[in-house]
Amino acid sequence: MDPRYITPFIASIQNVFSTMLQLPVSIDEPRLKQDNRATYDVSAIIGMSGDVTGNVVLSFPADTAQRLVALFIGEDISTDNPDFADAIGELVNMVAGNAKADFSGKAVSISCPSVIIGQHHAVSSGSDTPCVIIPCQTDCGELAIEIAIRETNAASTGDSTAQAA
Amino acid sequence: MDPRYITPFIASIQNVFSTMLQLPVSIDEPRLKQDNRATYDVSAIIGMSGDVTGNVVLSFPADTAQRLVALFIGEDISTDNPDFADAIGELVNMVAGNAKADFSGKAVSISCPSVIIGQHHAVSSGSDTPCVIIPCQTDCGELAIEIAIRETNAASTGDSTAQAA
């Protein structure tokens, strides 16, 4: 995947977590997701369409997600409180929204976030788009950004780097 | 939710399942999702953006999903085979794509599908958008379409609208 679609997410999560949660985020080496075996307890998914198509997922162990939500809204709530999913969805919305603002010259729409809650679920975004995992460490625990996006083919964008039909 | 955003999904799932799987679908009374307690084993999520924003989810018990995939690709495969998630994603892509073609006069983009696999997970699309559940019955078992979409309000589009950097 083009690194100019990776680095905006690193800057964005550090910026959003620092601003909204006063929480530093350290980034481990991004890697290609090789299988669907990575599983999480809480995932927030946002779809992208337009010049760039695909999905961005923020995934957490449940205890990390609960600590982040407590920092974000100022109180401890359980994962089945509707405010929990709303808070996690708002975090991914800010991370994806800030990141796409750095996709220079690309017109990209993002969908509303979906939040998945359930022990050890796997998220797959289709085997035709490579998925890059950015592992993140915080004082609230570890989390991961999974990015499976690609430029929409030239037929619909006028891009000169046309895909062969 | 405006019924003209519900009926296209009913026509679409019946059309897609009949054409692709030779499988009739009977529809139970659509209802408002009242809480996040409804859980599934397999969910395929597609985001919509543009004049209509939100998410469409096709959710199944694992055995229903496996029977549908076997009909679709002609062989039994396990849920951790990457082709399984691809097949389920393709089904939701066709259902959402056909449905949005009937949103008269609305320009709507759909994202690539995400497929969630994990026993008893819950999907939340944010408490600010009502979610309508359409329960479906087939000879392969039951499934549900969950639709949480709304017309984009020009005054408060925020990050949901296209933005060229």
Image: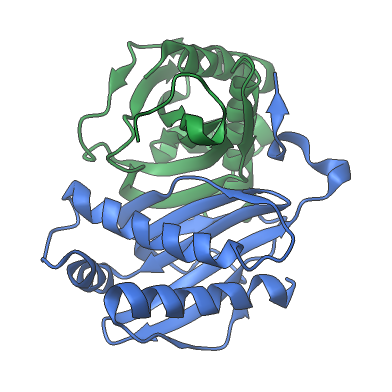
Chain colours: A green, B blue
Q: Nearer the viewer, residue A149 or A11?
A: A149
Q: In which quarter of the image is the C terminus of chain B?
A: top right
Question: Can residue A25 be seen from the camera position used here?
Answer: no
Q: Which residue, as the protein is rendered here, is positioned at the far right?
A: B155
Q: Position of residue A26 (x, y in %)?
A: 44, 10
Up-down relation of residue A151 to residue B67 (above or below): above
The residue depicted at 20 percent of the width and 36 percent of the height is: A35
For residue B161, what is the image quadrant?
top right
Q: Position of residue B2 (x, y in %)?
A: 75, 72
Question: Can residue B165 be seen from the camera position used here?
Answer: yes
Up-down relation of residue A141 to residue B108 (above or below): above
Q: Which of A122 and B120 is in front in this view?
A: A122
The residue depicted at 42 percent of the width and 24 percent of the height is: A141
The residue depicted at 70 percent of the width and 34 percent of the height is: B162
For residue A43, what is the image quadrant?
top left
Up-down relation of residue B25 to residue A101 (above or below): below
Q: Position of residue B80 (x, y in %)?
A: 18, 50
B4 vs A45, left or right, is right
Q: Position of residue A82 (x, y in %)?
A: 62, 55
A159 vs A134, left or right, is right
Q: How many circles with numbers are drawn on the protein?
A: 0
The residue depicted at 70 percent of the width and 74 percent of the height is: B4
A69 vs B61, left or right, is right
